[in-house]
Image (cartoon, rainbow, N blue to C red):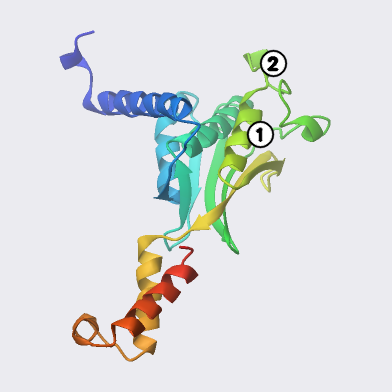
Amino acid sequence: VMARDVPEDLKARIERSARYCQELVRGLQTRRDPSMVTRSASEVVESALSLCEDPLRARKIGIARNFPADSVAVKAVGRELERVLVNLIGNAAKALPASGRILVSVAVSGARVVLAVDDDGPGLPPELLPRLFTPFATGCAKTGGVGLGLYLCREIARRHGGDLTAGRSVFGGARFELTLPAAASPQRCWSQATSELTARGFSNMRSICESPASAAVNTALTIAMRRSGFR
């Protein structure tokens, strides 16, 4: 097939998949010194869903999203969080009959962010739950699963300061929760800083810039950044 004959939307999906693979390989190569960046949790979910788009469409799996109104941020190493979600969504799709449903949600619980994948399939065998995240434990032997995916996903979650757990969904199927520490987004930090400065009598940016009380400004900014998670 000539490149000019490939539809643009297919080209875009191929490019996204290629970038995803490249970043996974790069992450493995630099694992000794990982660098985390702040990312929107909903953007991470959407990125993972875009990588699962074709197999989900082929099996007519319905996808629903439930995101909070306010932006929620997490710290991530490369595309490793997408790797976890792609695995969870892919496992859910394999367990579902055609036209099954998957709900991917983002929620905040205290200082933690919960990324959850629910499905309305048959659920997890109770006897598998105690060893679900151990190497070579699988409920997908018939579809070629070897039981390493969930083990690696939990290792990635813990490497990010979080965890990965499994249970029963309210829809009757399986539920997987990827729990991560909440990160300070730029918007949150600015909001905190604005509140701190307003409380100290600075009503706008001009009053801040013209004020000789630079020490007070620095103190307010430091407090705001610490409350937003910076150290």
How packed is label 1: few (under 14 Cα within 10 Å), some, or many (20 or more)? many
Q: Position of residue 210 (x, y in %)?
A: 18, 86
How far apart marks 2 and 1 lie (CA) works out to 17 Å
Circle 1 SS class: loop
Q: Position of residue 35 (x, y in %)?
A: 43, 41
Q: Which residue is mark 1?
A: 121
42 in relation to 25, above or below: below
Q: Which residue is mark 2?
A: 141
Q: Is residue 125 visible?
A: no
Q: Are marks 2 and 1 in contact (CB under 8 Å)?
A: no
Q: Is residue 177 visible?
A: yes
37 in relation to 198, above or below: above
Q: Amino acid at mark 2?
A: Ala
Q: Residue furthest left?
A: 4
Q: Which residue appears at 56% of the width and 26% of the height?
A: 98
Question: Is 119 placed left or right of 71 in the picture?
Answer: right
Q: Nearer the viewer, residue 148 or 78?
A: 78
Q: Which residue appears at 23% of the width and 87% of the height?
A: 211
Q: Nearer the viewer, residue 173 or 147?
A: 147
Q: Position of residue 4 (x, y in %)?
A: 16, 16
Q: Amino acid at mark 1?
A: Gly
Foreground label between 2 and 1: 2
